[in-house]
Structures are given as structure tokens and as C-alpha cells.
Amino acid sequence: KQDPTNHYWQGDYAGALTEQAAESLAAGDIATARLQAQAALHILEPMLTRDPDERDTLLATMTAKLLLASVNNAPDVAQSLREQALQTMQAVKIDRKDLRLLALQAEALLGLGRNGEARPLIKQLWSEGYRERGLVEMLQRERIAYPANPAFQQRITETARNSTSAVAQ
């Protein structure tokens, strides 16, 4: 049932645990969110150690680690988790311009109170039209303006219009 050698199943299971942790947090159940995030990290960290440049594992591990930091009631532990996540993300050899990775880095920096370092990443995410719900909610909590990017919205509208025209022909 829980085959530790089946990395695909383990990664999917850890992802589900992380999603459940986010749902628990949203429902105000901090203790359950903490347990779920810890369980996800218990699975993901060895996977990341085996293959540190595997993008999906990296993103899942950093998401779980930052989620655990956000529900940890010990400030020094939360800070350590964020610092570890940031160091890991900055050391990877994969494409560092992945918007999901940039959003996680911005989250870690904001959690560490390093808002000045986070601002260029946030600006880059905005200019690319990145609107992932978790990022937007985090920025709202931090009282950082992040309106929809009208130029990006226009590009989407034009692309959709062109696609519709091409299909009609």
C-alpha cells in the first residue's frame, strides 16, 4: 500500500498531504496542517536529496517546507525552515526563472522580513502575469499591492481572439 520504493506514488502522496495541509490551514486547523506538512516533508526531503535538480520534487518540497514554516509556533524553527528553503532554491541548477520557484523564493524572503530582496521577484512575477492564488493571498496579507497586469490581460485576450479566428478558418 505505501511502497517507499515507488517514488511516483510517494511524490503524489506527499503532494496530496501538502494540499491537505493548505486546506487545514485555511480551515484554521493549525495542528493538523502542521502534521500534514511534516508528513509530506518526511517523504519529500529524501527524494530531493537523491535528485536535487528534479523540478517537481524541488517545488513540492519547498512548498511543504514553507507551509510548515507558516504553521510553526516556534519563530526560530520557522525562520530556519524559511532560510533552508531559500538556500536550497538559490543553489539549484535548474532554470531559476521558473515562475513557481520565483514565487516560492519571494514567499521565503517575505517570511524572513527581507521585503527589499523580495520586491524585484514580485515585480518580475507581476510583469509575467503570474497570479497563483497562494501568492496573491500572501501578498495581500503582507499588504503589498499586486493588481492584475493589464498588458498581460491584453495579451491573453489577443491570443484567445487569434486562436478562435484560426479555428474558425
Image (cartoon, rainbow, N blue to C red):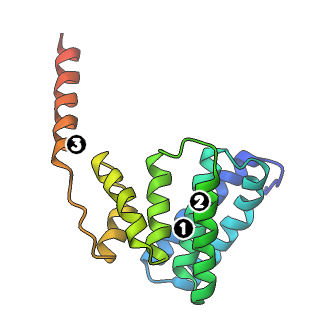
Residue 158 as seen in the image, left or right of residue 66: left
Rendering quarter of residue 76:
bottom right
Residue 11 as seen in the image, left or right of residue 166: right
Rendering quarter of residue 160:
top left
What's the amino acid at mark 3? Phe
Ranked by sequence position, the earlier of labels 2 and 3 is 2
- Residue occupied by mark 3: 152
Asked which secondary structure carries label 1, the reply is helix
> Within 10 Å of the Cα at label 3, are there few (<14), some (14-19), or many (20+) other Cα atoms?
some
The CA span between labels 3 and 1 is 32 Å
Instruction: Reply above or below: 131 against 66.
Output: above
- Residue occupied by mark 2: 16
Residue 61 as seen in the image, left or right of residue 42: left
Q: Position of residue 101 (x, y in %)?
A: 50, 53
- Residue occupied by mark 1: 20
Judge by depth and name the residue closer to the eye, 41 or 141.
141
Ranked by sequence position, the earlier of labels 3 and 1 is 1
Q: Position of residue 106 (x, y in %)?
A: 44, 63
Q: Position of residue 84 (x, y in %)?
A: 64, 68
What's the amino acid at mark 2? Ala
Return the mark for residue 112. none
Residue 118 in view (yes/no): yes
The CA span between labels 1 and 2 is 6 Å
